[in-house]
Image (cartoon, rainbow, N blue to C red):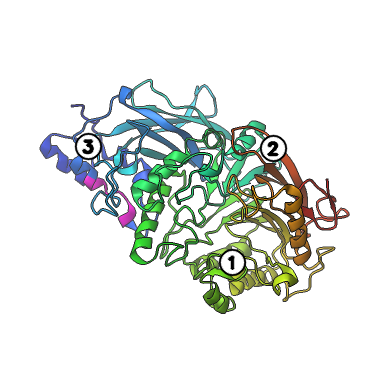
Amino acid sequence: MMLLPHLKLSAAAVALTATATIVKASSFENNLAYNSPSRRHPSLAVPLAHIYKRQTGDLFTPNELSFTHGVASGDPYDTSVILWTRLAPTTENVASDLVPGGIVPIYSDPEAAQPSSKAACVEFQISTSKTFDTVVDSGRAYTTSDVDYTVKFEAANLQPFTVYYYRFNVCDASKVSSVGRLRTLPEKGKKVGRNVKLAVYSCSNYPEGYFNAYGNAVRKDTIDWWIHLGDYIYEYKDSDVRTALPDRETYTLYDYRKRHATYRTDPDLLNIHSAFAGIFTWDDHEVADNSWKNGSLNSEGEVFQKRKQAAVRAYFEWMPIRQVDMDDSLRIWRSFAVGDLFDLFMLDTRQYNRDLTVLNGIAGIGGNSKEVEKLVDLQNRTIMGFNQEEWFYKGLRESKAKWKLVGSQVIFSRMTLGNLLGNQAINRDQWDGYLANRDRVYETLEGGKINNTVFLAGDSHAAWVSDLAWLGKREYDENTGKGAFGVELAGSAVSSASVLTGYVPRFISDGVSGLLIKANPELQWQDLFYRGYFEIEVGYGELKGEFWGVKDLKKRNGEEKLLARFLVRDGENKLARNPSVGGGVAYAGALKGGKVE
């Protein structure tokens, strides 16, 4: 039996000396995956006392271990970043299907093994050199089946706006992970020496195709960071181009861990995690379809609450995100300062205290639609929860940055089918179902005279570019953009199908986009045909957006098509017209006042 090295011990570890087994407690604590995602929900942490009681002191040998799912980094700050890997005795998930701490079963699962008494020891290094000649930070930690053998470190003492390389190794052994790369943020409040570029993603459904859109950003290698606005995984059972395990809908901790593990075998997802630091938030499918604070499409009550705890626990283990300050609920909303160039607000418009939503409803048809229609105008109705609202409005008002970027899962702008259905909103599951909450955002932008606000959205599996127009409340000219309060850029899916994908040819899809453009004054460009992503380049004088489409998802490839370009000038709070939106040309969908080539 190999004894773990002895250093300063916690009280729990000291108790183990009676059995002649000594565990280096700090090396468990260094692995942030054991923490709770929420400081207000310590029960979601993995109690180290239980691990110490079970530990025999045995470590897996290097030959028993593999870095099974690559490396990743996320939540970059100017002087620190979260590093992630998984060091496991097998490529399979073997952690038990138990509430964190291994005490109370969520649901029984015959595939889930009991917790192992053995630990894996892992070290990290981070350097400005690919050859790691000078190591600026390093650390050591243990991981066990209790956290699915995931490992999360916070690398600190870093320099702002600097490229770093990082790697992991089995402690005191030559078995080494692949090398990752990342860039820290510029120092908060300081001038940024050049334009910065981000790629924005959402809705990556593993069964519906390969994640080529992720790989294209790596192949071009022109971005600084990437943003994921949610639906990073999907919870339901599906099998099309490929099958996501477990081959059933996910309900348990084991299920969600297994689903994350399957997604992280896609080579392009592995590559983008390795190449760039990411900033992430969740949508509904990380938990369950059409989720809100008390339920989802097919779960409610205690079943939903336990399901949500399991999903959030697995998400925190598998994603390189920080534990954020908590208030009264599970929280992921947080902000990032990129010098004085922009502040990025990552919202949670899905899981955090969201009021009742429709269940797979569209244009007034679907579960809860009649009930929601009666609620849409209520002043106390919220898509964000009032604590998050207060935080968001305060952040907008106090921001000194040139731009305010807002990551919102669902589309903020009004979307209707026009006179065809009496201007009925297409989807009350978006901000169109929470009108008073949207009004409060506009009131904040107007009252604070806040300029240069750009919403970034996903969820819809289609691309939409709009002026932020407070229709019915303030005058707005769709031809010039006068009266707008900002801009919304909403991207398509990495792989998830739209309502028309695979069913109609592009000329019909583009025709539908044309009808949507005519029905919605603020909507300037729309595309339903392509899967893909968009990139934004942010400078002090202007913000540029480029939308990229990936058509073939049935095989891995690097092919993509430029769909449209857009420009937002400092202080104009609208899409630039030159003479029409985006310079007058798009290459797919429908463009208001311009042509599609």
Foreground: disc 2 or disc 1: 2
Disc 2 is placed on an element classified as loop
| Residue 259 rendering spot, x and y as whole percentages | 42, 44
Q: Earlier along the polypeptide chain: callout 2 or callout 3?
A: 3
Label 1: few (<14), some or many (≥20) within 10 Å?
Answer: some
Kind of residue at disc 3: Ser
Q: Are marks 2 and 3 in contact (CB under 8 Å)?
A: no
Disc 1 is placed on an element classified as helix
Residue, disc 1: 393
Residue, disc 3: 117
Residue, disc 2: 560
| Residue 261 rendering spot, x and y as whole percentages | 42, 40
| Residue 208 rendering spot, x and y as whole percentages | 55, 44
- Residue 234 appears in view: yes
- Residue 83 appears in view: no
Q: Give the magenta-colored segment's residue range.
A: 43-50
